Image (cartoon, rainbow, N blue to C red):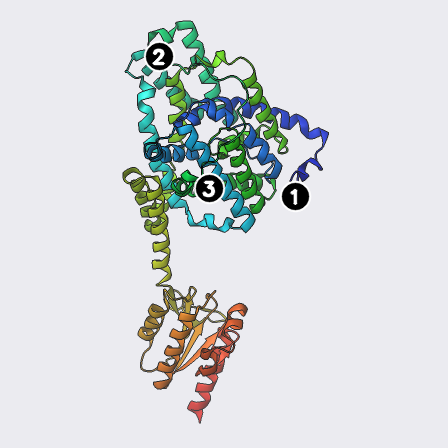
Amino acid sequence: MLGNNDGMLDWLKHYRRAMFAGDLGAGLVVALMLLPQGMAYAMVAGLPPVVGLYASILPALAYALAGSSTTLSVGPMALTSMMTAAALVELVPATGLAAPVLVVQLTLLCGAILVLCALLRLGFLCALLSRPVLGGFTAGVALLIVAGQVEVLCGAPAAWPSTMLGVGTLLALYGARRYLPAHLARLAPALLLAFATLLVVVGELDQAGVQVLGELPKGLPPLGISLQPGLWPELLPSAALLAFVVFISGHSSARVLAQRRGEQVNDGRELLGQGLANLASALSAGLPVSGGLSRSALNHAAGACSQLAGVITALLLALALLVPTGWLSLLPLPALAATIVFAVLGMLDLDGLRQAWRYDRGDAGVWLATAACVLLLGVEEGVLAGVLLSLGGYLARSSRPHIAVLGCMADGETFRNVCRHTVETRPHLLLLRVDGSLFFGNAASVTAHIEELLNPSVRELVLDMSAVNGVDFSALVAFCELNRSLASRGIRLHLAAVKGPIGDRLAGSQLMLQLSGCLFVTTAQAFRHLYDAATAGDTE
């Protein structure tokens, strides 16, 4: 396999002739999937279907230039298309401009943000979108899109041929996913759309009220872009959110497949590759793009060996636009709507919600609240609410870290929670382990809890710091005050098992200069020393 930590286009230096057959086959299979999928996702975004094909050509070539994944397939994706649609609902009336014009500017900003983040090495910011937030956001937007496709699925106005065709395609897609092998199930949308088009031709269903796609513009996408900086302030919030989701979706897909192949992905190159792909999409009148897991998994299963597979897919789609496109004009919209509904419903991660409910009700609440806010308030507001709830939940948990009272096990070296194990303790000696970093948000509650655990017989207090990974200035001040308070009552404060980086920061601090007790390398050392000292004092 090719390495993924090389420079741009270095994969070509390692390319071998034996890899071409796999890349060619994978490129052809993914092109068959992406042809109807690209058009469907453009419709999800409220754009002409051909825009989805435009966004499947140059972006794939741009990603091959800089991306690190050998299997990631870049193009329109359900989630980014849903977000684009949600943004356009507000922006089109506010600006009075056509949706294609706004989408190009939105895609341009999205790509520029990703490239800037790559240059500034800001990939870590994607961690702000936690799994519950992303799951709830996806569910909320998916339900909005499904609601918007019901009319197309059943025909407008409602007509039984349209309803039969749309619902029948939806049921066939479900059957294909349930009963066919995975690699065949992924091709089912293309095959079923071809069959539905054949039904329209043979049965003249377009004359019976079934809406069809209509003529597509022939030829390659127009190159060029008209910069409209006056729109950017209004577009920036949506573009920033899109950039986050584009990177998270593409990067997570690349990582999943890289793990299966024993490869690695480079965060910086992924940011740059996704950013260049979106800039290329804007240049070719496309919409925001990302790496889709289903397409990429098909690319992997079909035998892709390098980024050349994506290049071949792009070239085949370009060829499809160069040949006469009249064969696409009779593609029935109810069947296309069925593929949209099926793809979008497949993104509802209800199993993830069930797992979160069993593991952490707080995270499950964030999932549900984010979905509700997206449905009731809007996309950006819903995600912002989810992020704030996630951060608030984290701060709430961090503000009350677990504090264990420790005792000595029979081996004399291991110390465990007195509530969980049979251990040895001493009345004058209290051993506490703080399970969490100490910072401004929990310093007061930690010191208050320590005070509550003291009893009149305690003369030596040892804090096991083995689980503490950070101590900020507020926590330092709080523990200086605790040290003074304890000393005034004849109780000495000792620290044990302090990690090296924490010890380096504490060295020379006011706490260490005024510490009433000692600094011990291990809790066992502190226990033995203080126990022996107390025993010697009792003997005397």
Task: Say which amino acid is labelled 3.
Answer: Ala
Mark 1, residues whose alpha carbon is within 10 Å: few (<14), some, or many (≥20)? few
Could one spot residue 1 in this view of the protein? no
| Above or below, comparing residue 210 to residue 58 in the picture | above
Task: Say which amino acid is labelled 2.
Answer: Val
Q: Is 525 left, or right, of 370 in this rendering?
A: right
**Residue 76, position in %: x, y?**
48, 30
Residue underneath mark 1: 7
**Residue 366, position in %: x, y?**
33, 47
**Residue 152, position in %: x, y?**
33, 20
Mark 3, residues whose alpha carbon is within 10 Å: few (<14), some, or many (≥20)? many
Q: Which of 464 and 531 is in front in this view?
A: 464
Q: What element carries label 3?
A: helix
Residue underneath mark 3: 243
Residue occupying the point 57% across, 40% down: 258
Q: Which of 117 and 258 is in front in this view?
A: 117
> Marks 3 and 2: which is nearer the front?
3
| Above or below, comparing residue 98 to residue 115 in the picture | above
Q: Residue 340 has which mark?
A: none
**Residue 280, position in %: x, y?**
54, 33
Say whether marks 1 and 3 touch (CB < 8 Å): no
Task: Say which amino acid is labelled 1.
Answer: Gly
Q: Give the alpha-carbon distance from disc 1 to disc 3, as whole Å.
A: 23 Å
Q: Is mark 2 on a helix, strand or loop?
A: loop
| Above or below, comparing residue 406 to residue 233 in the picture | below
